[in-house]
Image (cartoon, grey):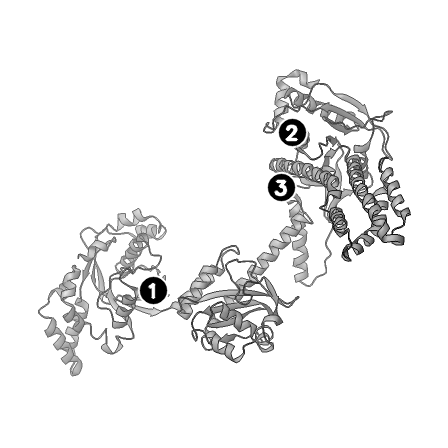
Amino acid sequence: MNLNRFLNTPFTLCISFHKLIEHYEYVAANETGYRAVQANEILKAIAPHPDLREGIADFEVLEEKLEPIKLLVSDLFPPALTENEIKAITVPFQDFLFNPTNRFKKILNNAGPKFDIGIRDFTEHQLYVLSCCLILQDHYEQAFDFSKPFFYDIPTAAGVMKHYRILYNADFMEILPTEQSVKLTQEDIDLLRDNFDDLELWKRYFPQGSWTMKGFALITLFDATVENAVSTLKGSLLSTPTHDVYEDILMVFRSIYRLPNLKVGFTTFNPDENKFGLATFNAKLKSYLLSGEEEEVCANMMCVQEFADLVDKKTYFTVSDVKKYLEKEPDNVLAQRFYDEGVQSFILAPVVKNGNLLGVIELVSDKPYELNSINANQLEIVMPFITDTIDRQYAYMINQIRAVIQKEYTTIHPSVYWKFQREALKYIDLHRQDKEYSLKEITFRDVYALYGQIDIKGSSDTRNMSVQLDLEDQLNALVPLLETLQPHFGNDLPSERIERLRNMATQLHLPLRADTEQIIQNYLSTHIDPLLKNAAAQKHALSAEINAYLVETGQTGEFHEHRKMYETTVAIINEKMSIMLDKWEHKIQAEFPHYYERFKTDGVEHNLYIGQSITPNRIFSMDDLYNLRLWQIQVLCQMEYEHNRIKESLPYPLDVTTLILAFSQPLSIRFRMDEKRFDIDGTYNARFEMVKKRIDKAFIKNTRERVTATGKLTIVYTTAEEELEYRRYIRFLQSKKMLHEGIDMIEVEDLQGVSGLKALRVKICYDILPERKRYTYQQMIDDIKDNVYLTS
């Protein structure tokens, strides 16, 4: 086998012992005594083998000369150390091993015949470039630091991966140029120094086989399994919090303890409730302490001493033989749980950060004595890293929790988050410097407001109707039941009470008063329900009928059927409209960021605020406002269309009305800390809020007709400029068949504290498609230029 067939390098390989032979020749000529005698004997023994000096390129020839080579390198491979040292003859960066020590042989044999040794994470690119660097360092005397640690990863017979650090000794090698070698200038060397990744450049200056590597090197390995495992663990633990490190941690512990079947668990500790729980940040981390439970009070599973060691003293707790331990303490819940899990020995290691117990690392083995109080101390080198990682995982979880709370309970919209963040950073920074600082109010000045809503028409009337129907059904079932029971109850159920219920049932045929539902429910809960429940408990003859009635009074019973239908209808409408609005709003945010909030009531309302102060890193223009107003009209039309499409499939086919409030004056909004929401700032600007709250129930002036109407978009405004602007939007969307032709001009009745309002009302086209494209303000301007009639 030709050794050079494996060398994709600039070298031609020639294994030679010429330098070592020259050393012995010097000793034989210049020294006396034992050293000189030994050198002469070695030289005499190798004299028949001149190729040991000249060089050998064939591995089979090398094998044939193993005995004289062993004699030649006997000083480098002392027989007394062959069972301890891990050493062999090699060539730097090559997986060529010759004359290994006995310990090296055992390591390779235990790895198995299928194991193929190779330097970890070492590519052909690195091999070629580092070989060139050897030439630059040896022949050109250039300083090239490539002292990267190299490792062999070799499994044991049991399957545990061990890691060996590689050290090279190249004292017996020399590098010689051939006729094909390229002579380099300093400029060439500097160019190469800055181009590690350009393999073709290196091959141009160092063609393959252009240099001869003559001699041999020594490779020495030392077991760096623990150190390497810790380094690997640190790398894994320093990765992102979302990275799953379980397999890495498991591999590290198995390498440290040399136990291929070792398993790792983790149990969290909650000091507020004094409970153990599962690790929420990694589903793979099983808890052997909990044994299938989600959480448990510490005292229920651990005796006083065990708990004190872990929680109070924060020291390791070990059991080397679970079976024997149980024989001594048969009532020990902790040991019994481990035994039931098939665990025969274990170590419990507390994870402590800043004096606080975060949880417990569990190392378990299915064999006795493999884990014990002695090897528990090996955890000392890794526990600091694991502790920091688990602490980071907790911090990451807390941040996620805060994000959920912020999103679901106290939303801060992304468009304004930057200002809250800036204020919070200032607050934190000054407090770190022990300086007093109170959070300032978050205010955005000179912003433009847009308000719109999809309101469920007649929702109050529908709810009252559903309440009436449910109460009628309940009283119609209750009165006959009480009439049957009255003889058995006697004075406990006076006939006056039954008569009272009959009168209530009659009143339900009249328009429902605001307090009717409450009066009936209070009467039933006070005078009727206790009587029926007591009779059912005493196994009354009519208990089956009584229980059947009581079941139907529950929230899921038929006496709530109509109210459930109403609530389901409102929930479906609100959810559908909210999803549509959020989806459209997400897209328009990309065009110009603005503040957005929506509310679910009997319908869906939304507020939009846009202006330079909200987005200081973008130049705001009035065209951005006009674009948002045009978008608002289109999205409300699409929402109206979608509701019309699903209306007949609803439990109650309720209609909706659509409203926009135009408001052209810039205003200020301020974040109210008490309510955790933005509100209009300033007395004058409060007019906008007053109109919002009252306009949807307003009537057309001198009529009893609402300003909003089914199937029509209503735009309420104040000034002639607002009317002109919105008429242009309407005319444009009419040309796109989104709105019907014609515009209703409406005067709005005077509201409390507000007068002079007007409205535009236009019919929405229900044949618009859900996937209809959205038109921008710029498209409208371009269209107007081409269609003069739109300017009227």
**Residue at the disc numbered 1:** 155
Q: Residue at (61%, 22%) from the top-left corner?
A: 782
Disc 2, SS: helix
Question: As drawn, is 767 to the left or to the right of 98?
Answer: right
Quadrant location, the C terminus: top right
Camera-side residue: 21 or 82? 82
Quadrant location, the N terminus: bottom left
Residue 752 position in % (x across, y down): 87, 35
Q: Considering only order in the chain, which callout, 3 or 1, is on the residue closer to the N terminus?
A: 1
CA–CA distance between discs 2 and 1? 67 Å
Q: Residue at (59%, 59%) from the top-left corner?
A: 395
Q: Considering only order in the chain, which callout, 3 or 2, is on the residue closer to the N terminus?
A: 3
Residue 617: numbered disc:
3
Camera-side residue: 483 or 72? 483
Camera-side residue: 680 or 436? 680
**Quadrant assignment, res 777:** top right
Three-letter code for the amino acid on which mark 2 is drawn: Arg
Residue 653 position in % (x across, y down): 71, 32
Residue 645: numbered disc:
2
Q: Considering only order in the chain, which callout, 1 or 2, is on the residue closer to the N terminus?
A: 1
Can residue 355 be seen in the rendering of this structure? no
Three-letter code for the amino acid on which mark 1 is drawn: Pro
